[in-house]
Image: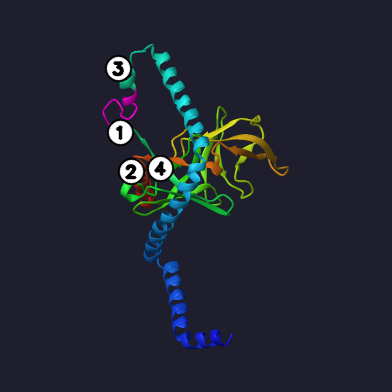
Amino acid sequence: MRNIIIFIRRYITFFTLLVLQIICISMLVRYNNSYNAVYINVASSFTGFFDKKYNDVEYYFQLKKTNKQLAEENAMLKNMIMTSIGKNGDTSTNKLQARIDSLYRDTLGRNVKYIFTTAKVVNNSLYSENNYITIQKGSADGVTTDMAVAGPKGIVGHVVSVSKNYSVVMSLLNHNSRVSVTLKGKPFTGIVDWDGVKPSEVLLHNVPKNIKITKGDSVITSNLSESFPPGLMVGRAIRVRPDAASNLIDIVLETSTDFSNLQYVYLIKNVFYTEQKSLEQATQQQQPVKAK
């Protein structure tokens, strides 16, 4: 005990300086946007390195389940291709390859609206109030904060922070996440978010009671989503939460994505996102012309 007291008395000036420096740095990071951005990039790179080492070990034990998911997805894609062939009455191998290639460009040779690339998940939280996912791709790979993220079976979230080699994704299981969706085959568009209870359930809000809901109904992304392509699976209806005080209900959805077993995801780039946002912002900034 005496030695501890002597040690503290000897280095009290150093420890005091260290504590004051930590307080100053935290205030700079919190209240200055430039320092905050630098801190996020450095922290993402640092934690991403250690998360990757941990994930490499975990990934080894998940190979069987991951391979099964990939096989199921390949089967689904093959079925889609065969359906397309059947509609066009064409079974030629050369023409099939031409059709697949044409999916990436329109008839004028321009890029399609959405471009998909894969990324490996190196960290994933499930039980926090606001959950995030770290992926092993960053600005060096062309990742930007306007990208949506999906898994083999449904949406995952969207990119909110990017460093050189890593990116942080705001999970669908986050109180700040909002996604525009529609009930497949029904005339309703609404918003899905997470209530923080179960990592396998999200809520679709303010659905009119006159819309008939059946257990298992599909909920997909709508054409009003800024980042997600329309038609991606979000979840399936499992039960309804009625509101006696209004003519609206909330639908509890089972997420299509199994967030407990995310190994790889798809980054989705909306090629026209920047153009669309720039035009919308410029229009909002224009002052209305007064009638004379």
Query: In terms of secondary structure, where does tag 4 sit?
Result: strand
Q: Residue 50 location in percent, x, y? A: 44, 56
Q: Which residue is mark 4?
A: 119
The tag on residue 275 is 2
Question: Of marks 2 and 1, which one's residue comes earlier in the chain?
Answer: 1
**Residue at position x 52%, y 42% in the image:** 61
Q: Which residue is mark 1?
A: 111
Q: Amino acid at mark 4?
A: Ala
In the shown orientation, is residue 257 left or right of residue 163?
Answer: right
Question: Of marks 3 and 4, which one's residue comes earlier in the chain?
Answer: 3
Query: In terms of secondary structure, where does tag 1 sit?
Result: loop
Q: Residues under labels 2 and 3: Cα distance?
A: 36 Å
As displayed, is residue 86 above or below residue 122? above
On the image, which quarter does residue 118 sit in?
A: top left
> Badges 2 and 3: C-beta atoms under 8 Å apart?
no
Q: Range of the magenta residues?
A: 100-110
Query: In terms of secondary structure, where does tag 3 sit?
Result: helix
**Residue at position x 56%, y 42% in the image:** 192
